[in-house]
Image (tube, helix red, strand yellow):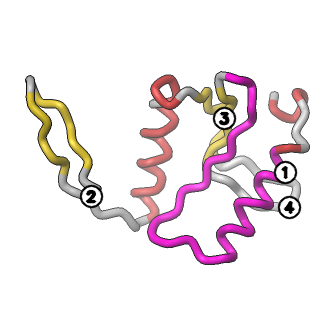
Amino acid sequence: MPIYKIEGDALQPVAPAKFGAAHDEDRLETILQASGDELGVCFIARQPHTDHGKRPDLIGIAADGAVEVWELKRGRAPRDIVAQALEYAAWAAGLNREALE
């Protein structure tokens, strides 16, 4: 599905960007973190350490107070990535206010 941007009174297609280098993920994290208002989330941590020594990309608080864990991946997600997401969700569900601060 193409993505479009508004230029004047018209929609213009946006060319797909290459993504894959480590600095690209860092750049995307920076862009997402700066766009929290538009995304409806207040990002509070970037690459924090979990109790299991893992590091999700971004942690935020949604407008409804829910904790959100953002893990960026490119391409199709193999089963181990799904397991990683579930591990992060379980970790985030156990965070209390003190841990979030």
Q: Could you tell which of marks 2 and 4 lies nearer the N-terminus?
A: 2
Disc on the earlier residue, 1 or 2: 2
Q: Position of residue 82 (x, y in %)?
A: 68, 67
Q: Residue at x 60, y 77 (%)?
A: 78
SS for dot 1: helix
As helix, strand or loop, the secondary structure at mark 4 comes to loop
**Residue at the image point whose x is 52% and y is 63% from the top:** 73
Mark 4: give few (<14), some (14-19) or many (20+) Cα within 10 Å. few
Label 2, on which residue? 17
Q: What residue is shown with label 3?
A: 60
Say few, some or many: other residues with alpha carbon within 10 Å of mark 1 (under 14 / 14 to 19 / 20 or more).
Answer: some
Residues rendered magenta in the picture: 64-92
Q: What's the amino acid at mark 3? A: Gly
Left or right: 33, with 6 as reference point: right
Which amino acid does the dot numbered 1 rest on?
Trp
Of badges 3 and 4, nearer the viewer stands 3
Whether residue 35 sits left or right of residue 14 in the image: it is right
Give the camera-side residue of 101 and 74.
74
Q: Which comes before the other along the chain, label 3 or label 4?
A: 4
Say which residue label 4 marks: 52
Residue 29 picture location, percent across and down: 50, 46
Residue that carries the numbered disc 1 in the rendered image: 91
**Disc with the residue nearer the chain's start (4 vs 1):** 4
Kindly report the distance in space between the C-alpha atoms of the residues bearing marks 1 and 2: 32 Å
Q: Quick check: is 74 in the magenta stretch?
A: yes
